[in-house]
Image (cartoon, grey):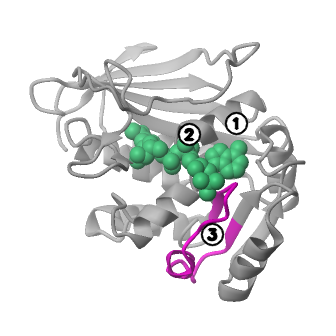
Amino acid sequence: MSEDLLQLYPATGTRALEGLYLGHDLQARPGRDGVFVYSNFITSLDGRIALPGPGRNSHQVPPAIANRRDWRLFQELAAQADLLLTSARFFRQSADAEHQAHLPIGPQADYDDLRAWRVARGLKPQPDIAVFSVSLDIPLPAINHYADRKVFILTGEGADRHRVRRIQDGSHARMLPCGNGTRVDGRRLRTVLREQGYHCVYAIAGPSVLHTLAAGEALDRLYLTTVHKLLGGTRFDTLSWGPVLEPPPALPLRELYLDRAAPPGAGQTLAVYGD
Ligand SMILES: NC(=O)c1ccc[n+]([C@@H]2O[C@H](COP(=O)([O-])OP(=O)(O)OC[C@H]3O[C@@H](n4cnc5c(N)ncnc54)[C@H](OP(=O)(O)O)[C@@H]3O)[C@@H](O)[C@H]2O)c1
């Protein structure tokens, strides 16, 4: 991981990759209302964040764009989180052993420093977890895998009672109703999370969750890695999925870096948008 990044905006020269996002010190950001919500994606030049995995229908981050340098930064962002926002899809794939990773912070030795960083700052060893779901089709063993963390299920007040009961009886997860119907309303989410005492909230789900946050003016910052490759494909996920956002949320550029080291022969740009 030794090759430095070139900082393009504001243009100030080279920067080490390790520690780049940790240095953003998100815990120190006050947030508009005491909550700071950030997200992170890796995309191809043609806007693909996920494609069908080989021999299956479910989508995954394309191996052609996934890389260790981006994953290190993903983990640095998680290290600063009090709460991760993820999706029921992740838990379903995890039960089928199709998921691409354990929820951060990763157990690998490469991230020992990040776990130590949290402890040194008086944070819990691992961030808590909140799972977006309409269906409440969430495998209980996948929830109970995270018995060492608080787990919340974010859903609507109209959620199916039998399914609510199944999760409450079979796991340590707590329901957090956050919308009038069966979906989470991004506008109510920040209030609910603040009431639960959360400050730094890292959204690591996909396009519908990002859309929910954007539609509810609930997203403060977006980290976006663009790998300099074209992937094509006709069945793919892109950053956001849902009705046209009106008005479109503006996320001004804060920082931009060029990483020539990964993936080999292509490189990637690391952009930070928003607050
Ligand atoms: N390249 C990247 O950086 C990146 C990042 C994240 C994800 N991905 C990929 O993108 C693909 C899609 O990820 P994903 O399925 O986790 O993303 P998602 O589209 O954000 O989440 C899907 C699930 O979350 C629940 N959900 C979404 N919005 C909701 C709302 N407003 N209220 C309640 N529940 C809501 C629903 O669960 P129920 O079905 O249970 O109702 C829905 O099926 C995956 O292949 C993933 O690997 C890529």
> Quick check: 39 above or below 240?
below
Residue that badge 3 annotates: 122
Give the number of the disc on residue 39: 2
Q: Amino acid at mark 3?
A: Gly
Is residue 138 covered in magenta?
Answer: yes
**Does the residue tagged 2 have its C-beta within 8 Å of any atom of ligand 1?**
no
CA neighbours of label 3 inside 10 A, class few (<14), some (14 to 19), many (20+): few
Residue 110's spot in the image, x, y percent? 28, 62
- Residue shown at 88%/58% (left/top)? 195
Is residue 41 covered in magenta?
Answer: no
Residue 195 seen anywhere in this rendered image of the structure = yes
For the residues labelled 2 and 3, say whether their Cβ atoms are less than 8 Å apart.
Answer: no
For the residues labelled 2 and 1, say whether their Cβ atoms are less than 8 Å apart.
Answer: yes
Q: Residue furthest left?
A: 265
Residue 82 seen anywhere in this rendered image of the structure = no
| Mark 2 or mark 1, earlier in chain | 2
Side of 2 relative to 246 (left or right): left
Give the spatial CA distance, label 1 vs label 3.
Answer: 28 Å
CA neighbours of label 2 inside 10 A, class few (<14), some (14 to 19), many (20+): many
Q: Amino acid at mark 1?
A: Leu
> Quick check: 164 above or below 23?
below
- Residue shown at 82%/54% (left/top)? 156
Q: Nearer the viewer, mark 2 or mark 3?
A: 2
Residue that badge 1 annotates: 213
Q: Amino acid at mark 2?
A: Ser
For the record, the magenta segment spans: 129-152
**Does the residue tagged 3 have its C-beta within 8 Å of any atom of ligand 1?**
no
| Mark 2 or mark 3, earlier in chain | 2
Residue 211's spot in the image, x, y percent? 64, 32
**Total of numbered circles in the picture?**
3
